[in-house]
Image (cartoon, grey):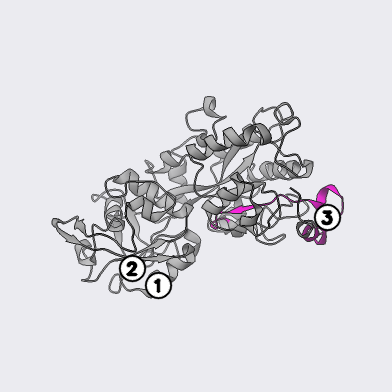
Amino acid sequence: MFKRNMIAASLAVAGLCSAQAMAAVVGGGATLPQNLYGTSVNSGILTITPLPGFAPYVGTGSGTGKNAFFNNNGGLFGQPGVTVDYAGSDSIVSQTELNGYNSQSAALYGPLVQLPSAATSVTVPFNVAGLSELDLTSQQLADVYAGRYTNWSQLGGPDKTITVVYRLDGSGTTEIFVNHLNAVDASAVPVVSNNFATAIGFDPQNPPAVPQADDPDNEVVPTYVGGNGSGGVVAQVNAIDGAIGYVSPDYVDFDNPAEVVRVKRSASDAEGLLPSEVNVVAALNSISLPVGGAANADDPLAWAPAAQLANPSAGYPIVGVTNLIFSQCYLDAGDNLRIRDFLNKHYTGVNNAEVSNHSLIPLPAAWQEEVHDTFWSSSSPLSIGYTSVCNGIGRPL
């Protein structure tokens, strides 16, 4: 496959003149970091020219982004025939996806590389007339989203139907959210998935009657409404009195207790926590990368600590990371250069301010150092473009 002339031309307009610079690193996926990465030339940390010099990021959702990468299908980014060099995903690579890559692609493109890029929270916006603020425990949230509470009066609020607003699309935000609810109560949310219906175990468009948490003999049909993307969820929450949703923090006033739920770890907590940067960082600092220590450095799953972040021991409890997925090897020397240049900047703190400016949380310094030493340092056999691994192989031109 070959890079399309339109991509080369867009970079040439930005001032790249050498033949090698005419190519670009193509990718997309999760919408959460799309403005940080840049959806047009020079609009984000990936699209800065001359380097990193990635093509504009294509926000499609995490599921589509991973699909495009694993199947090298540029058509999913609106660019049929173009090589997909990387994906952005809030949804971590599954063991099944990793096994498939290892059996079909590793010999051609080198080992899979999955890196945390920035941290995020999942906020819980609500719209309930008469409630100026709302504190809920993680258990209560699990019960609400499983349909075990269907009226706000069951939670100390007004006599009003609870409308749960959920993501219709395959979403990393959904996966981070249900990852926490599953860790709190797997009987309420039995599956961790980027699909909400799969997570709760029934079709929210045709939900069954569900026993109520405060009265198990009373079965009530819960009310669910879907929205496309975080923007669609926010629109539904704002339009429906009695609604509660879940979105990435850039779509709401995330530190405003009149707009988002303060989450309590237990009923004994006097007050819940908002997803402020200090509360998210406290959760991250309770975990070290790679998970399980240096012996696991060659395992892509050890760099996305979803299980450890499912219910962290400190800080705001609904947190996750948005990830970048690469192959270790690229046949295009320019692609290799740009990816390495990005790693060298991003994991030495150069982009920290921009990350914060886009309502995301920079990774802890210790995490950044581990990624930089492992995947950029020329002495590391796991580094992008490592010669003895990538001799004659790589993602296609």
Query: Mark number for residue 35?
Result: none
Left or right: where does residue 389 sit relative to residue 307? right
Q: Are marks 1 and 2 in contact (CB under 8 Å)?
A: yes
The three-letter amino acid code for the residue at tag 1 is Asn
Left or right: where does residue 316 sit relative to residue 13? left
Q: Answer with mark 3 or mark 2, whichever residue precedes in sequence.
A: 3
**Of residues 351 and 51, the one drawn nearer to the viewer in this rendering:** 51
Q: Position of residue 164 (x, y in %)?
A: 33, 63
Q: Position of residue 244 (x, y in %)?
A: 34, 64
Which residue has dot 3 on it?
16
Which residue has dot 1 on it?
238
Q: Quadrant of residue 28?
A: bottom right
The three-letter amino acid code for the residue at tag 3 is Leu
Q: Quadrant of residue 294?
A: top right
Which residue has dot 2 on it?
243
**Of residues 210 and 30, the one drawn nearer to the viewer in this rendering:** 210
Helix, strand or loop at mark 1:
helix
Q: Answer with mark 1 or mark 2, whichever residue precedes in sequence.
A: 1
Whether residue 354 can be seen here = yes
In the rendered view, would you say 369 is above or below 316?
A: above
The three-letter amino acid code for the residue at tag 2 is Ala
**Of residues 43 and 165, the one drawn nearer to the viewer in this rendering:** 165
Q: Residue at x 29, y 61 (%)?
A: 207
Q: Residues within 10 Å of mark 2 (few under 14, many from 20)?
A: many
Q: Position of residue 384 (x, y in %)?
A: 68, 36
Whether residue 370 can be seen here = no
Q: Residue at x 69, y 45 (%)?
A: 342
Q: Residue at x 61, y 56 (%)?
A: 76
- Span colored in magenta: 9-33
Q: Quadrant of residue 241?
A: bottom left
